[in-house]
Image (tube, rainbow, N blue to C red):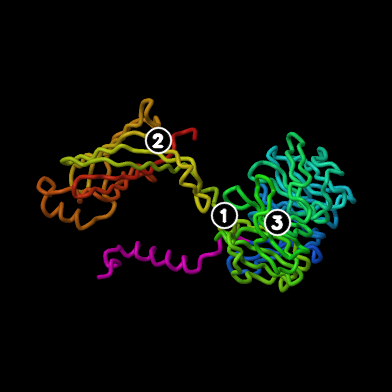
Amino acid sequence: MSSSRFLPPALFAIAALCSANAVFAECSHHLLVSGYFSSNVVVFDACTGVKVRDLDTSGRISGAQAVRLGSDGRLYVVSEGNDRILRYDASTYAFVDTFAQLDSNIDPTGLDFGPDDDVYVASYSNDTVLRLSDQTGALLDLALPAGSGIDGPDNGMAFGPDGLLYVPGYDSDSVLRMNVFTNDIQPSFIPARSGGLNAARNILFEPGGQTFLVTGELSGAVYRYRLSDGGLVERLISGLQRPTGMALAQDGSLLVLAQPNERVYRFERQSGTPMGSLLDASTSGIDGGTFLTLVPNPALAVDASQVGTQYWVAGSGTAQDRVVDLEMISATGTVFGENFDPGSVVRKRWGSMRVRFIDCDRAEFSYASEGPDSANFGSLTYEVFRVLGSEAAVACRTQGFDRVPGYGWMSGTWFSPARSGEGLLLEVAADGTAVAAFFTHLPEGF
C-alpha cells in the first residue's frame, strides 16, 4: 500500500515539487578558467562543463592569470598584461573595481591572501613577491625580494595549511617556501628538476595537510610532494600536454587544465587514474589556459535574509505515566554543507524539558535552562498541540486518554499557535525511551 495516501494533499504536492526540483538541481559550483592569450576568464558549470558566461566582456582583463575568492566575497583576478588586480562580485560576477594598478614592469602572475590578511602578488619578471594592503591595494613592501633563489614566480603561489608561502618558479623548475612573519626563506624547498619537474606552474594543497601537488608544464606531469620537507612522493600523472591549472572538484576528484587543447581533465586524486574530460575551454574562447578556480554557484548562494535566529537542541529521556522528562544537549562547532566536520562538534548540556500530557492531542510543555550546567536560556511553561494526526493518536482518542496503553501515541510534532517558529519533535518507543528535538530561537542579543 502506498504511503502517499496518508499524506494530506498539500504535503503530497510539496513532496512532489521537491522531488521534481531534485531531478533538475543546479550544480553547487562554477569553474572559472583563465585564458592568457585570449585575455578572458570564462565561467563554466562545474558539473556538466557547460559554459555559463564570460566573467568580463569589457576588455578589462589582459593576460588572465590567477583568480582567488576573497573573504570579502569578491573575486581577485590577476591581469598580467596591464599589471592590474581586478575585483568582481562573486555573487553576481559584476565588475567592482581595480584593486591595484601595479608598475608596468611587475608582470603579476600569482595572488593569495596571507595570514596577516594582506594580499600577496607574485611578480614574474622581477622574481619578487609584493605585499599589498587588503584595504587599499597599496604596495606595503616586498615580502620576497629579488635574488632570493627563485626564477619566474608563477600563478600557483599560495599559502599552505601551515601558514607558509609556497612560490613555484617557472624558470627555475623549483618551489620556494618562506615564513612571511620571520622572513625565513627556503629557496630550494623543492629543488630544481626534482622528479623531473620542468616549469613549475601551479600548486594545490591536498586534504589532510600532508602533501601537495605541483604541475610541471614543460614536463607534462603532475607531481606529489611532502609538505613537511618537500620530498618527492611520486609522479602522480604523466603524459599531459602542458598542464597548468589545478582544482579540487566538489566530488573530491582532481581537475587539471592542459594546453594547447585547453581541456580540463578529471582524475582520481589519490591514484591519478584518468576519469575523462570535463570540458573543452577552447570552444568557449579560452586560448592559453593558465588557472582554474572553483567557486560556489552564486545562484545557489545562501540567502542572508534567511540566516536568522533559529536554534535547535536535541536530547533523550523517558516516559512514565503521562509525563516525558528529557535532558537536552546543544551541538556547536561546525558548519553547514560539504565542509561539515563531525569531529569539530562540541556537545554541552542545554537544560531539561518536560511534556505533561493533558489529553491525546494537547500537553503542558516546560523547559528549564538555568544554572551553571546549562545554556541559561531561562525557563517557561505553555500548552502545545499536536500538528498532525497518526494511527496511534486515533487509537488514543478511540480508547480514551485515561485508558490508552503504552507510549506510542505521544510521538509527534507539537507546537503552540502563539509561538511561531518554535516547536518540539518527539518520538517515544514502546518501552518509554524518548528522544526529542526542540527548535526555537536564540536569546535577544545574539
Mark 1 vs mark 3: give the one in front: 3
What residue would you read off at disc 2? Answer: 348
- The amino acid marked with disc number 3 is Val
Q: Nearer the viewer, residue 158 or 211?
A: 211
Image quadrant of residue 66? bottom right
CB of mark 1 within 8 Å of CB of mark 2? no
CB of mark 3 within 8 Å of CB of mark 2? no
Question: Regarding mark 1 in the picture, which secondary structure is present there?
Answer: loop
The chief SS type of the magenta part is helix
- Mark drawn on residue 214: 3
Q: Residue at x 37, y 28 (%)?
A: 373
Mark 3 vs mark 2: give the one in front: 3
- The image shows residue 21 at horizontal and vertical percentages of 47, 66
- The image shows residue 348 at horizontal and vertical percentages of 40, 35
Judge from the rendering whether residue 372 lies leftward or rightward of residue 76; answer left or right. left
Image quadrant of residue 279? bottom right
- Graded by Cα atoms within 10 Å as few (under 14), some (14 to 19) or many (20 or more), the crowding at tag 2 reads some
- The image shows residue 328 at horizontal and vertical percentages of 34, 38
The answer to whether residue 411 is magenta is: no
- Residue 57 visible in image: no
Q: Residue at x 68, y 53 (%)?
A: 232
- Numbered marks: total: 3
- The amino acid marked with disc number 2 is Lys
N-terminal-most mark, 1 or 2: 1
What residue would you read off at disc 1? Answer: 301
- The image shows residue 14 at horizontal and vertical percentages of 39, 63
- Mark drawn on residue 423: none
Q: Which range of residues does the magenta coloring cover? A: 1-30
CB of mark 1 within 8 Å of CB of mark 3? no
Question: Regarding mark 2 in the picture, which secondary structure is present there?
Answer: strand
